[in-house]
Image (cartoon, rainbow, N blue to C red):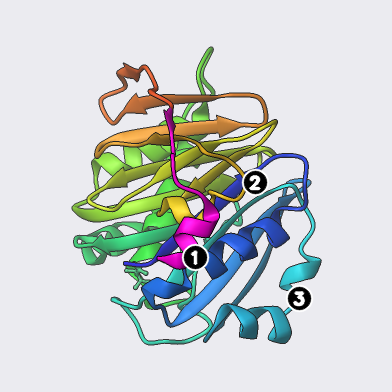
């Protein structure tokens, strides 16, 4: 279980996400990657090895877009390869996903998806969940209110056994991220005109001290202007914004 960083704001997402991923390096990892949303298209850079290797060996700093997600992976399903690194993109190119944890029933979900035309480029449990969200997104009716994207994530997670901290982007939703957790930490940072997501406060403390600690079974929908939290059972949750009292200097000393 490793690192998650997400960003929605006015700055270039990739540089901010890389800074966050570097602050999570102390946890150990075997691969790193970033995806941004750029006008309905995902731009992705991912690679085995260190974050510095990702910066030197790929075009990660050139990824355009002000919404993005990044990951440091500790492989559980599939070897340490570039293809298995996160983010994963669904085979219909609609959904991008990063994931910490283990999807225990990934094999049966994969069996369900394969006859429906979904294909897989990696050996990971994560790519299976990514395609399950794409499947529900494509099937989900356009709601009169609420979000088809959020409902697709919610429906998919109801079928998942295992643990997850996830951050998801949708090609049709330019400045939006949906994130959720079960058995894997996830924090929303509420900044000045921007939002961040992280698996650990140290990844975002340099940009904001206002954080919401998401609970197991909760899902957050973040847009450029606001955020809302709900449960897998579709109940609304009133967010509690905490103030982190330690600083980046304390984090570095630690
Ligand atoms: N199970 C996923 C994989 O092997 C996520 C591993 C992690 O938590 O970093 O790709």
Q: Secondary structure at mark 2?
A: loop
Q: Are marks 1 and 2 in contact (CB under 8 Å)?
A: no
The residue indicated by pointer 2 is: 171
Instruction: Using the image, determine if residue 131 lies above or below residue 73.
Output: above
Q: CA distance from mark 1 to mark 3?
A: 28 Å
User: Viewed as shown, does residue 8 lie left or right of 137?
Assistant: right
Q: Earlier in the sequence, mark 3 or mark 2?
A: 3
Q: Is residue 115 magenta?
A: no
Q: What residue sits 65% from the left and 46% below the top?
A: 171
Quadrant of the rendered structure where residue 20 is? bottom right
**Disc nearest the viewer among 1 and 2:** 1
Q: CA distance from mark 3 to mark 2?
A: 20 Å
Ligand 1 is found in which quarter of the picture? bottom left
The C terminus, quarter of image: bottom left
Quadrant of the rendered structure where residue 101 is? bottom left
Residue 252 numbered mark, or none: 1
Q: What residue sits 25% from the left and 36% below the top?
A: 217
Give the x, y percent position of residue 88: 51, 64
Q: Earlier in the sequence, mark 1 or mark 2?
A: 2
Q: Secondary structure at mark 3?
A: loop
Quadrant of the rendered structure where residue 200 is? bottom left
The residue indicated by pointer 3 is: 59
Give the x, y percent position of residue 247: 51, 49
> Magenta segment range?
242-254
From the viewer's side, name the closer residue of 140 and 101.
Answer: 101
């Amino acid at each position: 279980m490793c690192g998650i960083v997400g960003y929605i704001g006015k700055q270039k997402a990739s540089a901010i996400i890389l800074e966050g991923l570097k602050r999570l390096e102390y946890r150990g990892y075997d691969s790193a990657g970033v995806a941004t949303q750029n006008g309905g298209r995902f731009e992705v850079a991912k690679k085995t090895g260190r974050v510095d290797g990702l910066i030197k060996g790929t075009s990660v700093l050139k990824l355009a877009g002000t919404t993005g997600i990044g990951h440091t992976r500790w492989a559980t399903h599939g070897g340490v390869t570039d293809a298995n690194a996160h983010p994963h993109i669904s085979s219909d190119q609609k959904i991008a996903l990063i994931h910490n944890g283990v999807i225990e029933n990934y094999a049966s979900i994969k069996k369900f998806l394969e006859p429906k035309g979904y294909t897989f480029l990696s050996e990971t449990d994560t790519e299976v969940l990514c395609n399950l969200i794409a499947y529900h997104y494509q099937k989900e009716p356009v709601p009169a209110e609420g979000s088809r994207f959020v409902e697709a994530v919610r429906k998919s997670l109801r079928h998942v056994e295992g643990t997850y901290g996830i951050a998801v982007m949708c090609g049709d939703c330019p400045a939006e991220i949906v994130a959720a957790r079960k058995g894997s930490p996830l924090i929303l940072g509420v900044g000045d005109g921007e939002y961040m997501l992280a698996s650990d406060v140290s990844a975002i403390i340099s940009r904001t001290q206002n954080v919401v600690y998401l609970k197991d079974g909760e899902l957050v929908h973040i847009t450029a202007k606001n955020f809302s939290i709900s449960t897998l059972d579709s109940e609304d949750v009133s967010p509690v914004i905490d103030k982190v009292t330690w600083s980046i200097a304390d984090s570095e000393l630690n």
